[in-house]
Amino acid sequence: MPDLEYKQLRRAYGFDEVALVPGDVTINPDQTNIELHLDKLTFPLPILAAAMDAVASPAFSVALSKFGGLAVMNLEGVRSRYERPDDVIQQIVSASPAEVTTLMQKIYAEPIKEKLVGERIRTVKQAGAMVAVSVTPQLTKRLAPLAVEAGADVLVVQSTVTTARHISKSYKGLVFSELCSSVPVPVVVGNCVSYNTSLELMRTGIAGLLVGVGPGAACTTREVLGVGVPQVTATMDCAAAREQYYKESGRYVAVITDGGMRNGGDVCKALACGADAVMLGSIFAQTEEAPGHGYHWGMATSHSALPRGTRIRVGTTGKLEQVLHGPATVTDGSQNLVGAIRTALGVCGAFTIKDMHNVEMIIAPAIKTEGKGFQLKSAQC
């Protein structure tokens, strides 16, 4: 009989399919160290806010920075296109489901105004907060110098899928090694989900790597393009590349899992998979400080020809402080994330996040199928 195998498939895993194994020794949670080191910068919390207009406004960036996290502002969003962005966001929030995608395509067609780029960054800096900004590869050469001049502390170059080599007949692709040597701030690049691409990107000199294609709550890339890798597998593969690069160079590149996390359990699993930090969107969109008023949409939602995201209703569940430090008023794990991280490290016997990378993980039944029937019934009532 002929060999009919055309290509091999490997099993990939998402957060619901794995669990962490407790350590042989436990540690008091308040003795754990959960700092994020990004090149020469240190942040008390390993938590970033996604570069989405419904989340990372200047005001939100200031608020998260005061707690020790880092928000990434989208330099190609409404705040760089309109003098009164809050009015524009209200239009998006108020639109009907049938008209919202077309409305956003029209709104985001407004040209970016370089004056506003600097103004938004300076607003955050004047409040004494750290500033991270996000640009796409296509506009990096134009916007990166403006951002650095205005005082940006971190530059994030972000697209749905990012590689170190891009082939195009229409323009010369962005060369990350040239970018890293030309700007005096850490460069974070994403998004990526594979070992080989991660290793190649790290070799260009970047300080951090965003991991995640398709898992975000507002992302439809897997539905529209069929492209994506579940976050447990993606994070582990990219973390393996980081370890290899560290052996080669002695330089440590932060791996940041971006998207797909709904609660503290998912965040802790991402760290155990090898992430040094997480980037959150929908969880922060649920805070009272978020500018989206209980709505959330991705960066690619407004694409002029092929939207790869959608506006979703996430609701408003509490303040930013509750999400980070509690006290939690909901039982779904979306609040007191810092408490969850510290407790998970303590239960698993990890003093630091790097120690957490060595925690044993197992393939496990989805939590909702393992003795949680009454929780499901309560949620439906």
Image (cartoon, rainbow, N blue to C red):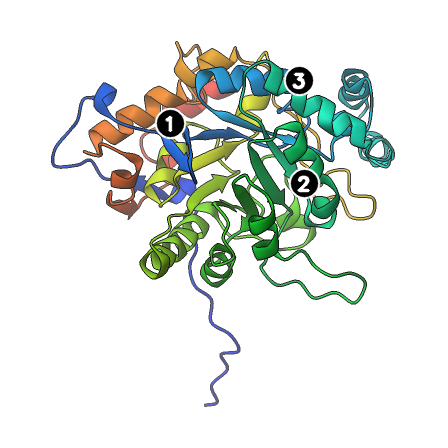
Residue 243 percent location from the top left of the image: 34, 54
Q: Which mark is residue 123?
A: 3
Q: Amino acid at mark 3?
A: Thr
Q: Residues within 10 Å of mark 2 (few under 14, many from 20)?
A: many
Q: Quadrant location of the N terminus?
A: bottom left
Describe the element under mark 2 as helix, strand or loop: helix
Identity, as a three-letter code, of the amino acid under mark 2 = Ala
Q: Is residue 208 in view? A: yes
Q: How many numbered marks are there?
A: 3
Disc assigned to residue 373: 1
User: Is 371 above or below relative to 205?
Assistant: above
Q: What distance separates the C-alpha of mark 3 from that of mark 2?
A: 17 Å
Residues at circles 3 and 2 in contact by the CB criterion of under 8 Å: no
Q: Which residue is mark 2?
A: 144
Identify the image quadrant of residue 266.
top left
User: Which residue is rendered at x = 53% and y = 43% of the image?
Assistant: 188
Q: Residues within 10 Å of mark 3 (few under 14, many from 20)?
A: some
Pick the front one: 33 or 288: 33
Q: Is residue 5 above or below residue 253?
A: below
Which residue: 29% across, 40% down? Answer: 354
Q: Say which residue appears at 22% left-offset and 34% top-offset.
A: 350
Looking at the image, is mark 1 or mark 3 nearer the viewer? 3
Q: Separation of disc 1 and disc 3 at Cα? A: 49 Å
Q: Position of residue 23 (x, y in %)?
A: 17, 36
Q: Residue 220, percent across and down? A: 66, 43
The secondary structure type at the circle numbered 1 is helix
- First in sequence: mark 1 or mark 3? 3
Q: Which mark is residue 17?
A: none
